[in-house]
Image (cartoon, rainbow, N blue to C red):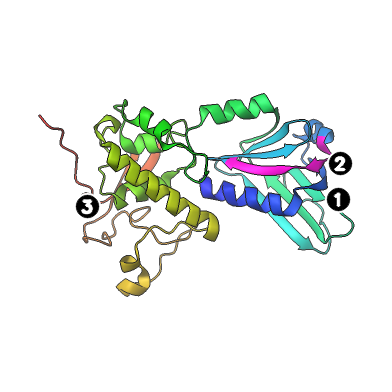
């Protein structure tokens, strides 16, 4: 499932390509056809992300809400000669209506959610979501209040979108490793300073992900160039410490990276760098 930085990149692409312009809105597949007809020919005002939710704003406080889920994909094409016929199950198509600019279009396929919401509907989704480290208006204390009261593992809490929005399996595993935190440690045993350090790290790492389109979490001394190792090959791109590196040696201590299913997702950690938390007696 795409992590939060991907949705923020898409929001930026949509804004640059369509904001302030008339757009044709269609649903070649048909599942969004009635809602598309209400928006067709209007000005697309803006696009923004909150965690893994994408909102595309139109006049009258109407919003297309998109959640890509596991299989969704949104492709934005700008500066093309012609807009091609739809290929596959395109639930939503946006086309720039301008006759003075090069053609541009965006196609959405396979998303878990594509729905038309009012302002109240959009705000209800935001209200259910935790703070998003990429957003400048995010308040880390909102997440901390949930974490410090919970006996759930910190690894589980970081993946709970009601606690923290936008963090997925990769950033979860990597930020815990970077701060040497036992992923099985209950949230209510974490210290406030530890949480603040992890939050600050996520703000920086995820902003870099928006900029590059990759998830890179290794420090300069652990890059392939610094260590004389081959670059990592993985479909998410980027250099990481533990994510999907189970059975391989830790880049820091050489211990074999482990994996275990936690809350339905594969967790990755180094048992030496992230020693088990022992509560004080």
* Region in magenta: 39-49
**Disc on the earlier residue, 2 or 1:** 2
**Do labels 2 and 1 touch, CB within 8 Å?**
yes
Q: Is residue 28 left or right of residue 197?
A: right
Foreground mark, 2 or 3, reads 2
The image shows residue 3 at horizontal and vertical percentages of 50, 46
Instruction: Identify the residue shown where x is 21% and y is 60%.
Output: 253
The circle drawn on residue 206 is: none
Instruction: Identify the residue shown where x is 36% and y is 70%.
Output: 224
The answer to whether any part of residue 183 appears in the image is no
Q: Quarter of the image containing the C terminus?
A: top left
Foreground mark, 1 or 3, reads 1
The circle drawn on residue 273 is: 3
Q: Residue 216 versus residue 191: which sits nearer the camera?
A: 191
Q: Secondary structure at mark 3?
A: loop
Instruction: Identify the residue shown where x is 43% and y is 53%.
Output: 204
The circle drawn on residue 41 is: 2
Instruction: Identify the residue shown where x is 56% and y is 31%.
Output: 126
Q: Secondary structure at mark 1?
A: loop
**Do labels 2 and 3 touch, CB within 8 Å?**
no
Q: Residues within 10 Å of mark 3 (few under 14, many from 20)?
A: some
Residue of label 1: 97
Q: Residue 216 versus residue 86: which sits nearer the camera?
A: 216
Q: Residues within 10 Å of mark 2 (few under 14, many from 20)?
A: some
| Residue 42 is covered by the magenta coloring | yes
The image shows residue 190 at horizontal and vertical percentages of 26, 36
**Disc on the earlier residue, 1 or 3:** 1
Q: CA distance from mark 1 to mark 3?
A: 55 Å
């Amino acid at each position: 499932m795409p992590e939060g930085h991907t949705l923020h990149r898409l929001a930026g692409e949509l804004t640059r390509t369509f904001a302030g312009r008339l757009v044709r809105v269609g649903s070649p597949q048909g599942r969004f056809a009635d809602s598309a007809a209400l928006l067709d020919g209007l000005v697309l005002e803006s696009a923004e992300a909150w965690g893994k939710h994408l909102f595309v704003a139109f006049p009258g406080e109407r919003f297309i809400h998109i959640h890509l889920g596991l299989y969704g994909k949104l492709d934005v094409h700008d500066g093309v000669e012609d807009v091609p016929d739809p290929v596959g199950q395109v639930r939503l198509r946006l086309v720039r209506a301008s006759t003075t600019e090069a053609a541009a279009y965006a196609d959405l396929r396979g998303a878990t959610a594509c729905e038309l919401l009012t302002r109240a509907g959009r705000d209800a989704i935001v209200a259910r979501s935790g703070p998003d480290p990429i957003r400048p208006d995010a308040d880390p204390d909102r997440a901390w209040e949930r974490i410090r009261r919970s006996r759930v593992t910190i690894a589980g809490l970081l993946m709970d979108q009601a606690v923290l929005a936008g963090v997925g399996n990769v950033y979860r595993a990597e930020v815990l490793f970077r701060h040497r935190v036992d992923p099985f440690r209950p949230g209510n045993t974490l210290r406030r300073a530890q949480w603040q350090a992890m939050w600050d790290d996520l703000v920086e790492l995820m902003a870099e992900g928006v900029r590059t389109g990759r998830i890179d979490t290794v420090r300069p001394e652990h890059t392939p160039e610094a260590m004389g190792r081959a670059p990592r090959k993985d479909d998410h791109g980027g250099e990481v410490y533990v994510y999907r590196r189970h059975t391989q040696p830790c880049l820091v201590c050489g211990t074999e990276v482990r994996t275990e299913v936690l809350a339905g997702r594969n967790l990755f950690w180094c048992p030496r760098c992230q020693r088990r938390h022992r509560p004080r007696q």
